[in-house]
Image: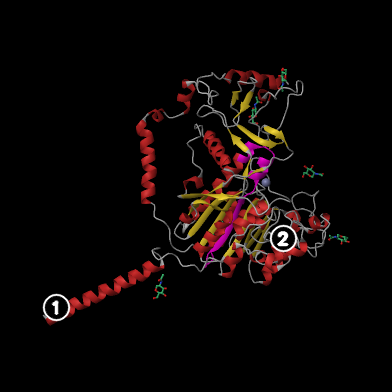
Amino acid sequence: MVCCNVILFFNLVSLVIAVPFRDEYHHDITEYDDKINLLRYNNQENNAQFWLDGAEKTLKEKIEKKEQKGIAKNVILFLGDGMSMTTLAASRIFFGQQSKNPGEETVLSFEKFPYSGLSKTYCVNSQVADSACSSTAYLNGVKGNIKTIGVTAEVKLRDCDSMNVPEHQTSPVTSWAQAEGKATGIVTTARVTHASPAGAYAHTAHRDWESDSDVSSDKQDPEKCMDIARQLVTQSPGNKFKVILGGGRGTFMTVNDTDPEYSNKTGWRNDNRNLINQWLDDKKKSGLSASYVWNREDMLKVNNTDCILGLFEPSHMRYHMEADPQMEPTLEEMTELAIKILSKEDKGYFLFVEGGKIDMAHHGSLAKMAFDETIEFAKAIQKANEMTSEKDTLIVVTADHAHTMSFSGYPQRGSDILTNLQQSGIDLLPYSTISYANGPGYKVNTTDPSKRYDLRYDNMSETRYQFPSTLPLSSETHGGEDVAVFSRGPWAHFLTGSFEQNYIPIVMGYAARIGPTGRIDFPSNSGSSIAKNHSITIIISSLLIILFTKIIKIHN
Ligand SMILES: *[C@@H]1O[C@H](CO)[C@@H](O)[C@H](O)[C@H]1NC(C)=O
Ligand SMILES: *[C@@H]1O[C@H](CO)[C@@H](O)[C@H](O)[C@H]1NC(C)=O
Ligand SMILES: *[C@@H]1O[C@H](CO)[C@@H](O)[C@H](O)[C@H]1NC(C)=O
Ligand SMILES: *[C@@H]1O[C@H](CO)[C@@H](O)[C@H](O)[C@H]1NC(C)=O
Ligand SMILES: *[C@@H]1O[C@H](CO)[C@@H](O)[C@H](O)[C@H]1NC(C)=O
Ligand SMILES: *[C@@H]1O[C@H](CO)[C@@H](O)[C@H](O)[C@H]1NC(C)=O
Ligand SMILES: [Zn+2]
């Protein structure tokens, strides 16, 4: 308690009491301290020209921006799991504040993309999506039921027979890409068999059926309802992925296999199948060079391989802030390797990259960790943006669903996004800028349960600080509002406005000429094939004019 009393004293000084004014709605806006503000932001911000110049620069970028209307040889879909728009606003501030800037003016890598839109995330039977039904939407173009993956809404949760009916199985964008000779891959910081990446290859009536032991512990027959890991290694399109990088060694190894990193752990499978060995054998049989790696050092040594399987933890990869940087690669490093391998393909590729731990951090109300994972996600996108051209590579960045985190109050400009406190005029106790509608951060004052917990006892910049919530839940929930979609590259301008989440792969397929909309012609003014026809016409007519002029000259 000695430490906490120090914090209590420190934070009291910074609390400013709200002064009520005539306006009945905004009286919680405190009188700001101008001296603090001037220290925090650029003096130029007091100048009208500063703002007009900035806005004009943005306008000129729009004027000069040429819509990309060629064929997308490559498509990369970046999925920030649970990356709500509130997460973006808070993460960019957190990022800017790490460089001692006020923070609000910071721009995350993908926020510089020229186009953005809004995606509606609800699923067929649920108002708020989970990562399973949403991955069916943004990877298969079809909405299904909550907790199911790669199947239509005909398939109810746990309905094994129904999930095996071919008409109930949806076709993912990875299959569309493979059908046109493109290479495919998945990268994630979660288990590679977790709900989001599973939408790229699996058909299942339950997202939890990741290994055969998960299926049997759910009282189902794993020989009948094939687990997700086995689908990845043995079924199409997963069995043709050239890149699989992420966590989840456990679902690939048997209970008799000792984990290479943790000698006190084994695999999870009960069916005697070591899927790592099977994957290596299959690639060898197909005449492809293949590498399996389980740590960062080995991954960075991989060079000139056709296929890679990297599984860096028995379960999900660790939070970036807690991972051993020698043992686990960053999302950026995995993305870079994936693009290097896939770029060798003549016909291009489709790559799925997930920042899988933003969601997990939010579920634990670990906002600081969620912001850091968002920044790591942005770094991976920055790398992909640098490694590819917008002329032939469509990059789409989105989230599967939102979360309940709110960013509220009237904190002064440049206030620490994690620790700033304001005071309620009602109970005279402080409240934080970041809080959740529900979750494990709910606390009451145990000595006086009629009172709210006094946040000045807490150190809110701790990595695992659980931000306060209005009501108690063991795991904070998803949010139902729309999520943002940012894009650049061919036909990215078609991902603007407000649309259903399942529209996203339809645009990716159209741009890359794959899947159900891959044969729909580009509009006649698109400047691609038509323009070529036009230029041929122009060249031929110019030649004819020159020829005729010469003939006329000769005759004269
Ligand atoms: C397994 O080993 C790790 C260290 O490698 C240790 O931290 C952990 O507590 C051990 N777990 C069990 C169940 O013994
Ligand atoms: C594990 O090894 C034992 C002993 O060799 C064997 O009986 C059992 O079938 C194996 N189990 C699995 C899941 O491979
Ligand atoms: C990978 O191989 C290529 C060609 O063999 C070589 O030029 C390059 O230096 C190698 N890179 C690394 C990191 O070993
Ligand atoms: C609980 O309430 C008591 C009495 O008002 C107060 O002294 C104490 O600081 C509060 N503690 C917390 C953790 O809110
Ligand atoms: C609060 O936590 C941060 C991050 O762990 C640490 O750097 C800081 O020293 C802590 N503050 C106090 C007063 O303990
Ligand atoms: C361009 O010309 C070719 C050959 O005449 C034709 O097949 C093709 O459809 C034309 N493209 C468009 C977009 O009209
Ligand atoms: Zn979640």
Disc on the earlier residue, 2 or 1: 2
Task: Specify the amino acid type for callout 1.
Answer: Lys
Work out whether 414 lies above or below 235: above
- Is-magenta flag for residue 347? yes
Residue 311 location in percent, x, y?
Answer: 69, 54
Between 163 and 307, which is closer to the camera in this rendering?
163
Which-is-in-front pick, marks 2 and 1? 2
Residue 206 location in percent, x, y?
Answer: 74, 56
Q: Which residues are magenta?
A: 343-370
Q: How would you rate the neighbour count of disc 2 (Cα within 10 Å): few for under 14, some for 14-19, many for 20 or more? A: many
Helix, strand or loop at label 2? It is loop
| Mark 2, residue position | 155
Is residue 320 rendered to the left or right of residue 214?
left
Q: Which mark is residue 553?
A: 1
Is residue 338 rendered to the left or right of residue 101?
right
Between 300 and 107, which is closer to the camera in this rendering?
107
User: Residue at image x 44%, y 59%?
Assistant: 391
**Image quarter of the C terminus:** bottom left
